Image: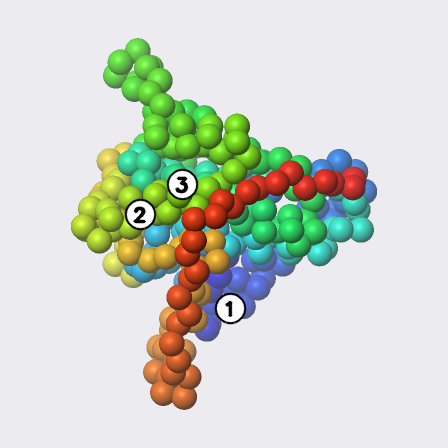
Amino acid sequence: MRPYGLFDVPAVTVANSLTLFPYLDSISNKMDFIGINYYGQEVVSGAGLKLVETDEYSESGRGVYPDGLYRVLLQFHERYKHLNVPFLITENGVSDETDLIRRPYFLEHLLAIYAAMTMGVPVLGYLFWTISDNWEWADGYGPKFGLVAVDRANNLARIPRPSYHLFSKVVTTGKVTRQDREQAWKELHRAAVEGKTRPFYRAVNKHGLMYAGGLDEPTLRPYINRDWRFGHYEMEGPQDLLSRLTRYICQPFFLGGKAEPETNDEELVLQPLELSV
């Protein structure tokens, strides 16, 4: 959760203080592991959640942000490392009927988890949400979360999506290859450049705030041409008028080129890391 504008900082601070740690603190002496459900980031604006036009979203309105899982794991580990218990990623997934977002989504989140493990966070396992399209409490059968599609008009036939085969490959080999990572991102990036659209199940008012309930019939939202891969997402500052004006005035003093990411054909191997629990 992050603030949209400078004046949303107090609301985010209060919300985080009330929701992140109090419950776990109250049961901390009874935990065998810490479960993390992570889908993405939410941007608070006033009394609602802002749809940021330059961010990529799932069909159900969650901002795609793999770096956030890395940050959450480090944050929780720092607070609870004295308990000496492991973490489980108990839910992580994205609603995406087109399956173009899902493939880079889980690859980048797995890389985020691995990066946290190399920093000493003991992650015991990862559960992807979900195997097949399901019924959502707030959205019904609209958003499609499954690695496997369910054809409800054809006797509930199960049809594996491309992400099913890619996820199976990662699980059986223990590797996220650079080739798979680049191919998954290339296909999504091409769709964004070509201006293609996909379903979106959140109503948005004239102020860009999303309503909580899902739509019975989706609108169409374009894919966003923004690099949200792990380690690539560039966080924007507060978007209120005062903050934007300040950045505009100060911009000439902070000019500089962006470093180009290194590219090579080496594999990114997710080695099992030994846990001392």
Residue 104 in picture, x, y percent from top left: 40, 44
Q: Which of 213/145 is in front?
A: 145
Q: Is residue 155 left or right of residue 165?
A: left
Tell me which residue sits at (46%, 73%) in the image. Answer: 6
- Mark 1 or mark 2: whose residue is earlier in sequence: 1
Q: Which of 274/267 is in front?
A: 267
Q: Which residue is mark 2?
A: 186
Seen as rendered, the residue at the extreme top is 155
Residue 76 visible to the viewer: no
Question: At numbered mark 2, what does the secondary structure look like: helix, strand or loop?
Answer: helix
The three-letter code of the residue at mark 3 reads Asp
- The image quadrant that residue 156 belongs to is top left
Residue 99 in picture, x, y percent from top left: 33, 36
Residue 146 in picture, x, y percent from top left: 40, 29
Image height of 240 relative to 105, above or below: below
The three-letter code of the residue at mark 1 reads Val
